[in-house]
Image (cartoon, rainbow, N blue to C red):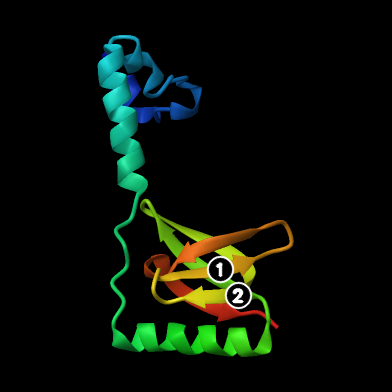
Amino acid sequence: MSYFDGMMDEKLDLSKVRDRGSKKWVAMMLPEHVKMLREYNENMKKMPKPELDEWDLATIQEQIEIALKRNVEIEFKLWKEGEIICRVCRIERIDLNKKIIEVENIYRSFTLKIEDIVSITILE
């Protein structure tokens, strides 16, 4: 019986392997390469701006009108630089010429671009 015959019967236990993952390769790369890889990973996480059809835009418009009339808090979902951001606030004023909505939350007042809005939910 050879050495390899005995090895075939044993199972390989990978729990004892202590691999450093990608850390071991970073030491062999130039800083420029590491920077490029980090930027690439960040860009891969970003999502394209959702395409809204007429039905979605009409729903958003209705929700804005209801929230403005009732003066209730709403949750805006906004697309900013490849990410969806949620804001909870009340609508103060709408400026259609500048295409912005002036809102305020418990901390401060700010403006939102109408083109960045992805969806709206009325909170009651």
10 Å neighbourhood of mark 2: few (<14), some, or many (≥20)? many
| Above or below for 60 versus 23 | below
User: Residue at position x 37%, y 51% from top?
Assistant: 81
Is residue 1 at least partly visible in the picture?
no
The count of marks equals 2
Amino acid tagged 1 = Glu
Q: Quadrant of residue 110?
A: bottom right
10 Å neighbourhood of mark 1: few (<14), some, or many (≥20)? some
- Residue with the mark numbered 1: 102
Amino acid tagged 2 = Ile
The disc at residue 91 is: 2
Q: Do the CB atoms of the residues marked 2 and 1 lie less than 8 Å apart? A: yes
Mark toward the start of the polypeptide (2 vs 1): 2
Image coordinates for residue 13, horizontal then vertical, percent: 45, 28
Observer-nearest residue: 33 or 75?
Answer: 75
| Above or below for 14 versus 45 | above
Image coordinates for residue 79, horizontal then vertical, percent: 41, 61
Observer-nearest residue: 100 or 58?
Answer: 100
Q: Quadrant of the C terminus?
A: bottom right
Q: Secondary structure at mark 1?
A: strand
Image coordinates for residue 69, horizontal then vertical, percent: 62, 90
Is residue 11 at least partly visible in the picture?
yes
User: Residue at position x 39%, y 28% from top?
Assistant: 12
Q: Secondary structure at mark 2?
A: strand
Q: Quadrant of residue 50?
A: bottom left
In the rendered view, does 116 fall on the left or right side of 122? left
In the rendered view, does 118 fall on the left or right side of 37? right
| Above or below for 69 versus 118 | below
User: Residue at position x 35%, y 50% from top?
Assistant: 46
In the rendered view, does 40 fall on the left or right side of 123? left
Observer-nearest residue: 70 or 118?
Answer: 70
